[in-house]
Image (tube, coloured by chain):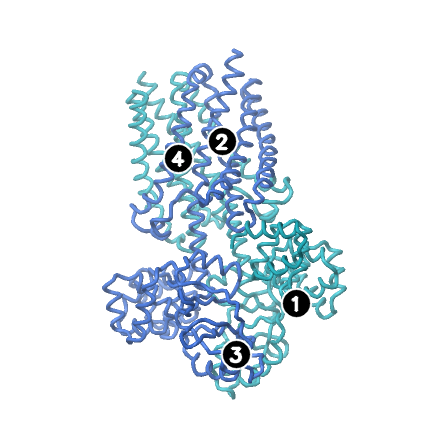
Chain colours: A cyan, B blue
């Protein structure tokens, strides 16, 4: 699917005002495709196109859209149609949309919905958005352990017709909704019809708690690889289920956070969306903290360089190699920190094996350092016709790159053992540390071997 | 679960040689937990523990383990037990394990398995590891459209007992295995028993092709959010299914690749695993290309600085601000490129909106640049008692940070429009470009306003 061509085609038809042609074009696409197409249009075009689409598909498209566009469309269309659509969407999705609206708008919608639905939604809205309670779907089919398999099957037959019921596993509860066990559809479908549910259910269930933070939920899903997990309250009463597609969005969010954090963009005050395309001031505030720390760090580098002002005055040529040393040290150090931080995040690397990785990176750093040191030495000698300078710059390069690798490897392990998120140490801090240490080593070498020899 | 405590406890019991205590300790954990615990032990301990675990759980644990440990364990245990375990695992998992073994070892295993199974496995092994064919499970329950719902249900009852069948949807095929439609279990369970499958099946199916590369498979899953997708060959004959947990691993791999690439670690020659913990030479080769490009880039920075050697000789103090300017420019530029590259990857940012983002980043860069320029100016004036120098350094900081933001924002859009993966432009190249441009601007300002005024 070539998004740009489709958009162009839609805009062409829109300018012709040919609703029939537009309708038949839109009908060709899957709801997930349409949810990619619509955000590319202008607001009034988006709502016009949305209204031309099949009623049945509209609710599906809303589910695929991001909250921003869900709210925009629901606010832009007729209120009774909006209520209809809301009733067709899974409860957790609706709660997300309502949670993203202005408070009085949310109230106005809730008041228009049937009271049973609006009560359920109000309960959902009470959970924090980024917890298991906030992402779960509260509608779950539950059975009791005294039922026979055939009773369970006919129960499903009458209860699961509603599109909103997500049918992955059947959860077994008692009358007070305490979670007792789980039966997969496969087991249910292949068991003897007269077997009691209590006999085939699994009692050791991985379960989530309503207050579990969403990143923990994502980790549990990734680890156990179930399609859905039950969510219980403090008293083990079943409150809902979280399905893998709910978690998908969380994983993407968490990945974005990991990537942002490692580039020195703080994510704990503002949403990723706000930083990328919200108010400028949010973006400035999310980006300034680590830049400020870099500023302080680089001032130390300035002070180090200033310590050697006599050296610089005597041999100003030595200054021109500063960016070379800092740049390569920073790069190789960032590579190391990236490898270790990502490894810690996926579980491939752990504290127990820290020394193994530190030693390995040391060897890698030394190998690359020797290679690059040699290159830099030869180039400098050839260019400046100054063997001593070449040797010093080359030697500084070897030490600098090796040290950078070492600092980049050790830092995340230290942070991890102090229970600090190692991602925050990345890029900015490492680059600065390496600037300070690298310049100090370089100018010490220059002062000791070049100036003293003059 | 505190992994370190558990490992310590296990090693304690191992040194006591108390198999009973070890067995009962291991029984307490879920297979997914055990798959996290085992890799932390030494090889002989790992195999000893594995053999103490319930036969039934062993196959499950193998599934959760990474290929490296799967191969190690299967090679380390009795061959007949290994064959038993292989028969209990889903075919796609087995094919992955066999594919990771030495060729003669693979052959020796295949020869020991029942010929029907070994033929299916050989077929799977023929697909490239990183395609839909390579990650799919070839065992799918298929029904035909003439069946009634009750026939389908009794068909499932007899055929789906085997643990290896993954039951998400029922696929409808003709006698030549051409894929005609799909019925979800929910629809099957809630439809009238005498309805024909042909009447309730969905005909417009999102399908994968055996040769689809795995990153495309992952994108399709993320977009449509199905639990499973059918895989067909060139003639639309059903070959297998890919389930969301297969894709999970792919997504993690792709994310790692994205993160590695943006730190200048190339991933197209070696596996991520190889780079992190394989041979040192692989790691050196994966890390050297971008470092080498940085080297060349930084030599340009050296040349630029050298152009101003007369300035440096007259005012060597100006050299000490180089790391400050380069460091902050590099950092803010990296932030911008991270935001845009990640946005392009998740689909939040696209080429159509390029100008909007470029303008927004320009404003952010200018705002932060002015703030930091002011800070640097005041600090420098206070420290060096030199107003002119303070103004020049501050001004260079503003220009440098604004330009860095702009370069960091524009570059990924240019690469994207040239159909080059924007991730590769990150970190290294940007930092170098900013070093070169930033130094040029700084020394031009110094030469024009400080030296000329002397």
* Left or right side of B229 for B378: right
Q: In the rendered structure, find residue A88 and report the number of the disc placed on it.
A: 1
Calculate the distance from the C-alpha at mark 4 to the C-alpha at mark 1. 55 Å
Disc 3 element: helix
Kind of element beneath mark 4? helix
Residues under numbered marks 1 and 3 in contact, where contact means CB atoms less than 8 Å apart: no
Circles 2 and 1 on the same subunit: yes
Name the residue furthest top: B454
Q: Residue B378 in the image: x percent, y percent?
A: 59, 24
Q: Are marks 2 and 1 in contact (CB under 8 Å)?
A: no
* Parent chain of label 1: A
Of circles 1 and 3, the one toward us is: 3
The secondary structure type at the circle numbered 2 is helix
Whether pointer 4 and pointer 1 mark residues with C-beta atoms closer than 8 Å, the reply is no
Which tag is nearer the camera, tag 3 or tag 4? Answer: 3
Q: Are marks 2 and 4 on the same chain?
A: no
- Residue under pointer 2: A298
Q: Position of residue A253 (x, y in %)?
A: 54, 53
Kindly check if marks 3 and 4 are in contact, taking CB atoms under 8 A apart as contact.
Answer: no
Say which of marks 2 and 3 sits in front.
3
Q: Residue at coordinates 47% horizontally, 66% vertically from top-left?
A: B229
Tell me if residue B14 comes above or below residue A307 in the rendering. Answer: below
Rate crowding at label 2 as few (under 14), some (14 to 19) or many (20 or more) other CA atoms within 10 Å.
Answer: many
The residue that mark 3 highlights is: B197
Residue A142 visible from this viewpoint? yes
Q: Which residue is mark 4?
A: B294
Question: With A286 as the anchor, is B258 left or right in this view?
Answer: left
């Amino acid at each position: 699917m070539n998004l740009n061509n489709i958009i162009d085609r839609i805009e062409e038809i829109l300018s012709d005002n040919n609703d029939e042609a537009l309708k038949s074009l839109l009908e060709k696409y899957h709801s997930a495709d349409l949810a990619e197409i619509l955000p590319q249009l202008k607001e009034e075009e988006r709502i016009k196109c949305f209204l031309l689409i099949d009623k049945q598909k509209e609710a599906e498209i809303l589910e695929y859209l991001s909250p921003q566009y869900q709210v925009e469309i629901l606010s832009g269309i007729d209120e009774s149609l909006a209520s209809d659509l809301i009733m067709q969407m899974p409860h957790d999705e609706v709660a997300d949309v309502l949670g993203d609206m202005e408070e009085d708008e949310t109230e106005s919608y809730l008041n228009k919905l049937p009271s049973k639905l609006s009560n359920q939604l109000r309960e959902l809205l009470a959970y924090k958005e980024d917890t298991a309670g906030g992402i779960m779907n509260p509608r779950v089919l539950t059975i009791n352990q005294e039922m026979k398999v055939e009773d369970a099957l006919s129960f499903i037959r009458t209860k699961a017709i509603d599109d909103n019921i997500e049918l992955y596993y059947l959860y077994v509860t008692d009358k007070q909704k305490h979670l007792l066990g789980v039966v997969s559809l496969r087991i249910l479908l292949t068991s003897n019809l007269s077997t009691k549910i209590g006999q085939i259910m699994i009692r050791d269930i991985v379960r989530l708690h309503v207050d579990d933070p969403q990143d923990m939920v994502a980790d549990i899903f990734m680890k156990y690889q179930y399609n859905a997990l039950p969510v219980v309250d403090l008293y083990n009463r079943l409150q809902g289920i979280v399905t893998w597609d709910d978690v998908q969005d969380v994983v993407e969010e968490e990945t974005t956070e990991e990537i942002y954090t490692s580039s020195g963009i703080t994510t704990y005050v503002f949403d990723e969306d706000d930083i990328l395309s919200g108010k400028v001031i949010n973006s400035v505030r999310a980006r300034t903290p680590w830049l400020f720390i870099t500023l302080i760090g680089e001032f130390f580098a300035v002070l180090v360089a200033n310590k050697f002002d006599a050296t610089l005055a005597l041999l100003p040529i030595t200054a021109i190699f500063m960016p070379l040393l800092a740049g390569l040290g920073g790069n190789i150090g960032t590579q190391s920190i990236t490898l270790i931080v990502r490894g810690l995040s996926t579980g491939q690397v752990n504290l127990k094996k820290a020394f193994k990785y530190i030693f390995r990176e040391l060897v890698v750093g030394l190998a690359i350092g020797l290679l690059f040191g040699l290159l830099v030495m030869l180039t400098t000698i050839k260019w400046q016709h100054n063997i001593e300078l070449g040797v010093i710059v080359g030697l500084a390069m070897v030490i600098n790159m090796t040290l950078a690798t070492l600092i980049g490897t050790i830092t995340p392990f230290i942070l991890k053992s102090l229970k600090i998120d190692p991602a925050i140490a990345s890029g900015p801090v490492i680059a600065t540390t390496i600037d300070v240490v690298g310049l100090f080593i370089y100018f010490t070498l220059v002062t000791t071997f070049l100036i003293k020899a003059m």
